[in-house]
Amino acid sequence: MDTTSSTPQDLSSKRHFHWTNKVGNEDSEVPTSETMSKIIEEETKEDDKAVPGPAATSQATRKKLQAVAISRLRSVLTVFGKNRSNLPFGLGSRVVGTLFGYRRGHVHFAFQKDPTSKPAFLIELATPISGLVREMASGLVRIALECDKDKEKEAEKKGVRLLQEPLWRTYCNGKKSGFATRRECGEKDWDILKAVEPISMGAGVLPGAEAGSDGEVMYMRARFERIVGSRDSEAFYMMNPDSNGAPELSVYLLRV
């Protein structure tokens, strides 16, 4: 990334970030196969130590201890499964980004792990698609999405991932542009993403037959570099080999 051509706006967009090459927001330690092997080994040692007495009672005691060991192992696996489900949707450092919207409608943004997967993050902006297209034609576009930390509900929201936040304030090149809302991928959204699935990079218009009954759909699709600054900040930079080092589109997610 070319830091020599940074504008004051770029600097303000990045002030909340403490950049790192690590992708992911793991807040808690996830048990590994090695950890679980140690647990099993320890439980086996406890079984051997806790089998005193006559042979008649040793077998019953061993079965009881084995049941306790299995119960504990199941608990570990349950925690492991929950932690896995809390990982940032499996997104890595490279994602597929699609900007789309009906010609007379609003902008939708979708980020996918790969072209065939369901969106890990899908939002609808209040900005008209035609307005964003004009903005992009004039030069580089920086979109900042901000959400609030609710101090009263901070304990409840501690486990909420940044990409799971439902409501965002939107800024386009420093200008306030209303609000954006996170949404689930509906049937029409999925039809559009499937229609552009073979496209790795490009922009165009989908005819009404492919886009659905609401008319033509304008779209832009590209690979994005994902950088996690903290659990409250992420950025997505469009990877364009023809942009001379400066991404044409950047999206910043901030929880402030």
Image (cartoon, grey):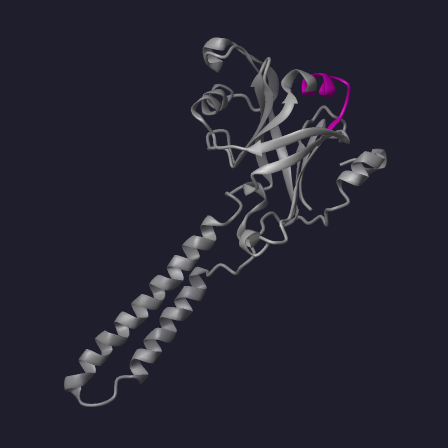
Q: Nearer the viewer, residue 252 or 104?
A: 104
Q: What residue is drawn where x is 61% and y is 30%?
A: 223
Position of 204 with respect to 62 (left or right) is right
Where is residue 64 drawn, in percent x and y? 24, 75
Q: Nearer the viewer, residue 141 or 227?
A: 141
Q: Is residue 253 visible?
A: yes
Quadrant for the N terminus, please.
Answer: top right
Q: Nearer the viewer, residue 212 or 147?
A: 147
Q: Quadrant of residue 67?
A: bottom left
Bounds of the magenta segment: 132-141
Q: Quadrant of residue 177?
A: top right
Where is residue 227 drawn, in percent x and y? 65, 43
Query: Does residue 136 belong to the magenta stretch?
Result: yes
Residue furthest to the left in view is 56
Where is residue 94 drawn, in percent x and y? 59, 37
Above or below, comparing residue 39 to residue 183 in the picture = below
Q: What residue is drawn where x is 77% and y is 27%?
A: 244
Position of 197 with respect to 78 (left or right) is right
